[in-house]
Image (spheres, coloured by chain):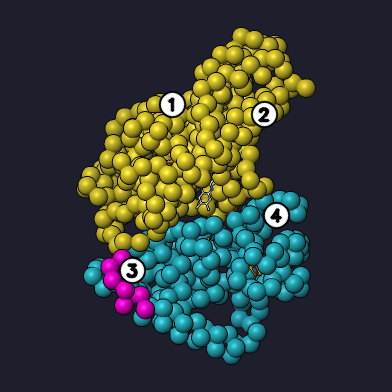
Chain colours: A yellow, B cyan
Amino acid sequence: MKNFTYAAPRNVADAVRLAGQPDARFIAGGTDLLNLMKDGAQSHGAIIDINGLALGDIVQRNDVIRIGALARMSDVAAHPAVRRSLPVVSEALLNSASPQVRNMAAVGGNVLQRTRCGYFRDSGTTCNKKAPGSGCPALEGENRGHAILGGSDHCIAVHPSDLAVALLAVDAVVLTDRRRIPFADFHVVPGTTPDQETVLGHGELITGFEIPVTPLAARSRYLKLRDRATFEFAVVAVAAALNMRGDTVRDVRLTFGGVATKPWRSPEAEEALRGKPLTTTTITEAGRALVRGAVTRDHNAFKVDLVQRALDGLLRDLGGVR
Amino acid sequence: MTADSEYKRRTVLKAGSAAVTATLVATPAATPAAAAQTDSSSVDMTLRVNGRDHRLAVEPRVTLLDALRERLDLTGTKKGCDRGECGACTVLVDGRRIKSCLTLAVMRQNVEITTIEGLVRGDKLHPLQEAFIRQDALQCGGCTPGQIMSGVACISEGHTRSADEIREWMSGNLCRCACYPNIVAAIQDAAK
Ligand SMILES: Cc1cc2nc3c(=O)[nH]c(=O)nc-3n(C[C@H](O)[C@H](O)[C@H](O)COP(=O)(O)OP(=O)(O)OC[C@H]3O[C@@H](n4cnc5c(N)ncnc54)[C@H](O)[C@@H]3O)c2cc1C
Ligand code: SF4
Ligand code: FES
Ligand code: FES
């Protein structure tokens, strides 16, 4: 790890000012940033420790739950309001990383964690995300873990956050020191600039998330499939939120992890269900709609089938369909 | 293991790491040792470990794990992966378990840090340490301090209602010797 200067501001204004330096970076839990710096995938001249800012609260006011950017994954997962009103968020967090990492990592840092693509994290290889224009060895190389949705000829790396998939399913809004960003607009697909992963500006501070409390979010669930039972990133993950009127799907959110370059919402899959009964036929149609635009590579074609099965299993469970 | 033999083992390890440092200095540029020579901006800090304040000066990039092991000679905390993946470096901060390889020493001032060395009370081992011995929950011992620190927290969190629950909540600690059944048994034993 290259050396850096260190500052621990006590208020947002100071933090943002310090982070305006060209080579500055915030540190929250440090659980991704320090790994990236040790691996040489990133280096920064100035590290701004934001743990002294008062951004750790989780509060419900009327029909909105506000989660501070510095709230730890473990505390958010265990919070009664989150468990009651946003079960998908709690489940996604409890299925992430390990108890120790969840005690350290903050939710603001979580949605900004970077891909686990092995080429990206290996300082000895080329990679468009790490060094723009240097090429993408994953396209023809080891791509079992890579995306089938949202990729480009420049990058097919999967966004690794479970929490982000859940936040997308419950219509979260990202709060920063200067604006509000709907979660759906926060992450961007790689296109020709895979080094650009969000719309956040340099030195812009996430202060928290706002999530509306709705019947839809209250009936939500997370299913994560991985190569070992636990303490592993998703091969495929599905978040679903469901609001039924009798036998008919009144509203639904379907979001996906492990298969796409950003936390992925499928309006097409949702449309296949909205206003219809939840049956084997409509669930199958939703799965087909999801993968219609999928682009597979040598080793990841299995995800096309797997993600449809995961969606099927989760929707049957959530909707009580046999 | 007697205190005597432990001391000898530590001495051997220290001699080993000194040799490594010497060879690194001989190679140019990006080695940690060479970088340290070009930039000496150390930070003065106080770390409160096992109930004692330690004053030290280290560069901001030094992890809590390296500060504990290399500066405070608390080598009970182990370095396995240095990437958050194995749990060998687990310590408690204000009673909560964390991985000390994923945090900077400079970020952990004004908190109470507990390492494996801080579990004994005089000559008496911690109940979970005793349970590890009773249940034969270690072979090489490389993961054991981390397992025990994580297990202490697992018990205080109340995540010990079943073997499955213990396995899930101990999943951040890997054991190359695969002592898992015995580790679960030791935690169940101590949680009683
Ligand atoms: C072994 C291991 C296993 C893991 N498994 C999983 C898993 O299964 N699922 C999963 O989802 N994640 C997993 N993770 C990733 C983990 O969840 C992230 O590393 C963590 O959430 C990042 O949060 P942090 O607070 O540590 O961020 P940091 O590492 O401190 O920061 C990450 C990035 O966010 C920026 N940042 C942080 N806070 C802010 C803010 N408020 N405003 C603006 N920028 C900010 C930093 O500058 C940095 O660029 C795993 C990590 C490890 C080490
Ligand atoms: S998939 Fe993206 S992150 Fe991975 S090597 Fe290609 S450009 Fe880099
Ligand atoms: S050394 Fe910290 S988790 Fe492996
Ligand atoms: S006892 Fe050898 S690694 Fe666990």
Q: With A172 as the anchor, is B161 left or right in this view?
A: right
Do the numbered discs 2 and 4 sit on residues whose CB atoms are within 8 Å? no
B126 is higher (above) or lower (below) than A253: below
How much space separates mark 1 and mark 2, taking CA atoms?
A: 24 Å
Identify residue for label 3: B31
Do the numbered discs 1 and 2 sit on residues whose CB atoms are within 8 Å? no
The three-letter amino acid code for the residue at tag 4 is Ile
Where residue A63 appears, x then y in whole percent?
50, 24
Where residue A36 appears, x then y in whole percent?
40, 53
The quarter of the picture showing ligand 2: top left
Identify residue for label 1: A184
A320 is higher (above) or lower (below) than B60: above
Q: Which mark is residue B166?
A: 4
Q: Is B26 a magenta residue?
A: yes
Residue name at image x 58 percent, y 52 percent: A99
Of tags 2 and 4, which is closer to the observer?
2
Q: How many neighbours does mark 3 have within 10 angstroms: few (below 14), some (14-19), or many (20 or more)?
A: some
Where residue A100 appears, x then y in whole percent?
55, 55
Query: Which region is colored magenta?
Result: B23-31
Instruction: For the C terminus of chain A, give its image quadrant.
Output: top right
Q: How many neighbours does mark 2 have within 10 angstroms: few (below 14), some (14-19), or many (20 or more)?
A: some
Identify residue for label 2: A309
Where residue B11 appears, x then y in whole percent?
50, 86
The three-letter amino acid code for the residue at tag 1 is Ala
Q: Is residue A190 visible?
A: yes
How much space separates mark 4 and mark 3, taking CA atoms?
A: 40 Å
Residue name at image x 44 percent, y 79 percent: B17
